Amino acid sequence: MPISFDVEKSIFSIETQNTKYCFQIVFGKFPVHLYYGAKNDAEIEGYKPEMYSFSPFYAEHGFEYFPDTCMAEYTGFDDGDFRTCSLKVKNANGDCATVLKYKEHRIFNGRLELPGLPFADVDKDCETLEMTLCDDVTGLIVKVYYTVFVNEDIISRYVSITNGGEYTVTIEKCMSLLLDIEGKNFDMISLYGKHNRERNYQRNPLFVGNQSIFSRRGASSHQFNPFIAVCEKNADQRSGVVYGFNFVYSGNFLDEVEVDQTGHTRVQIGLGSDNFSWLLEKGETFVSPEAVMTFSNSGFDTMTHNFHNFTRRHILPPEPFKKRPVVLNTWEACYFDIDEKEMLRFAESAKECGIDMLVMDDGWFGERNDDKAGLGDWFENRNKFKDGLKAFVDKVKNYGIKFGIWVEPEMVNPDSDLFRAHPDWCIQCRNREMMESRFQLVLDMGNPQVIEYLKDIFSKTFDGVSIDYFKWDMNRHLSQVGSSYLPPERQGEAAYRHILGVYELFRWFREKYPNAMIENCSGGGGRYDLGMMKYSTMIWTSDNTNPYARIQLQYSSMLAYPAATMSCHVSNHRLCSDPKTFNYRYHTALGGALGYEMHLPNAEQAIRDGVKEQIVNYRKYEDLILKGDYYAVLNPFVTNYSAYYYTNEDKSRILLSYLQYRPEEACEVVIPVLEACEDAVYLDEISGKTFTGKELIRGISVISENSECNSQMWYLIKQK
């Protein structure tokens, strides 16, 4: 069984295929962390107290337990542990002391659902440990959950907090996962950025003190991604200890890492305290979002594979189509300048080039001729579609292709019928002027009236319309976060309730239109997180489709998220027909699910023929990209190149890509393909050349160029 409890030693063991996690209940009261690492048969040693001057202790236990220095499992506030806490609650008497002690546990198959939240689906091998902690003074009950995903080497964590006392309390900080790690000689890897330049790779040494990444924007954000890793100094792709962490949530978050006086490292993932509090009345329960962690002692490749497999098997929704459609999106070609006649030209061109789906982007609804009006008025613009949306979509379908449409349900323009009727439905602080961003305001998705309005208007507009795909956008962050719906004492809940409302609408879309894909978008990759991936087949990786930017962005995204989640388009603003440039854009877009973003009706025949050929080739190795094992070889943040490959399970097919990030004087670049079968012979179906497995393992040589758009691909097939 994955989870066991040694009654004699009071030690819990949680085992995956390759890892082991252990903690002990000391004195029958205090959960103390012992070990998280490679699975082995070595006996786990119990807790040994470590005393530092000024460390508080309980008189009844003397110098046998120190909360300030022990490795913990979950901590309250002001409980003798001066490090960053997991839970802070303001009690009825005004103090925030919370001392959590073990009461009981249970182990069961499967898992519990998280009400209103996304969470990982389980398989037959999954088990859950529920550990109940209580504060004897306040009556607070905290249940800490550990769900084990054996085959993916993933352990998930979350908590439920129940007010078992007589008086109302307020949660002021809530974390889902705490991991104390022995030692401090680690680096921290995180992904930072901004709109149009998301998820840049950074690796920095830990220092004594607290370092964190976070979002206070009401979305997981372009600025920081919830994924982090903590690794040994010498860790690389194939060797070294790596701990990986992520959060199944799409709003404000806090990832914090603290190195303390003992030289140990504390990692926490959760909601934090900024823009979050929760009033908990007698008998009520609050459930935190789910966080996940994994361990590798063989470098980043293993961590990446664990997260990729976990996301594909337990997070992403089922594929609605046998083949993921290659889409033609209209945004970069037309912006708001669309109508039925123009869109049918796009449909005709898409069909000619072998594209599977036309996605009509912004501009089809209300008085939407620019970004200053119309959001919230989700009915077709009859000046652009005189016979209505259904008649237009039927004409598109007559070309034998699928149809997708753009929506931005969470937003409203002040210049809209919706805002004029319901200004109180926007997120706002009482008596303050509402702040616009990108000419938009944010609807209060925590208000049930807003959710019901959106369900109603989308039903009226889309019922009977044959839609295969929704591109769901979200183009501003939350400021002056308040809710006209909530009373003053619950205003701290507004941002969290907003995300719960967003998730409710996503679930409604998936139930209402079960045969349609959802592509998530937030100004590109502003909500590129596991919470959104639970409802979205894929995510628009970035609004920046420049291939040089995408090379870095896709490399860092793939550290934690599989290619199946990345929507990658060949864009061509100038409709350049230069084969080298066009292939470079295509080779870059093969980092994920292929699509196109160009004015195909106005393109030269050479471009149309090129698109058709690209799609035919993509279909040969699409399964490797979307389902295969990914291996990074060259990091474009530290070299001038990106090189990576995908393999199938038996390594009989390998898709290798080399992309030069910037021009340089010619030099040899060696790309080792270490997963090749040593004694085999491989045929590259692109060049016709053959390579032995030993040659591939030593590395394929390419010559860099002092020019732009230098790229190469190899589709290697093992010969019998």
Image (cartoon, rainbow, N blue to C red):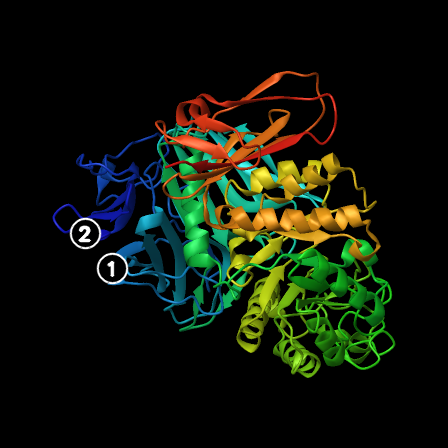
Residue 273 visible in this rendered orientation of the protein: no
In which quadrant is the C terminus drawn? top left
Q: Position of residue 32 (x, y in %)?
A: 29, 44
Q: Which mark is residue 32?
A: none
Mark 2 element type: strand
Q: Which residue is mark 2?
A: 5
> 356 or 469, which is in the foreground?
356
Tell which circle, 2 or 1, labels the residue nearer the N-terminal end. Answer: 2
Task: From this view, report whether residue 177 is shown above or below residue 63.
Answer: below
Q: Which residue is mark 1?
A: 105
Mark 1 element type: strand
Q: Residue at x 73, y 21 (%)?
A: 706
Q: Residue at x 48, y 40 (%)?
A: 646
Task: From this view, report whether residue 538 is shown above or below residue 407.
Answer: above
Q: Position of residue 716 (x, y in %)?
A: 48, 36
Q: Position of residue 304 (x, y in %)?
A: 45, 41
Q: Are marks 2 and 1 in contact (CB under 8 Å)?
A: yes
Q: Indicate the quadrant where residue 659 lies.
A: top right
Q: Amino acid at mark 2?
A: Phe
* Mark 2 burial class by Cα count in 10 Å: few <14, some 14-19, many 20+: some
Q: Residue at x 26, y 63 (%)?
A: 109
Q: How many marks?
A: 2
Q: Residue at x 70, y 62 (%)?
A: 351
Q: Amino acid at mark 1?
A: His
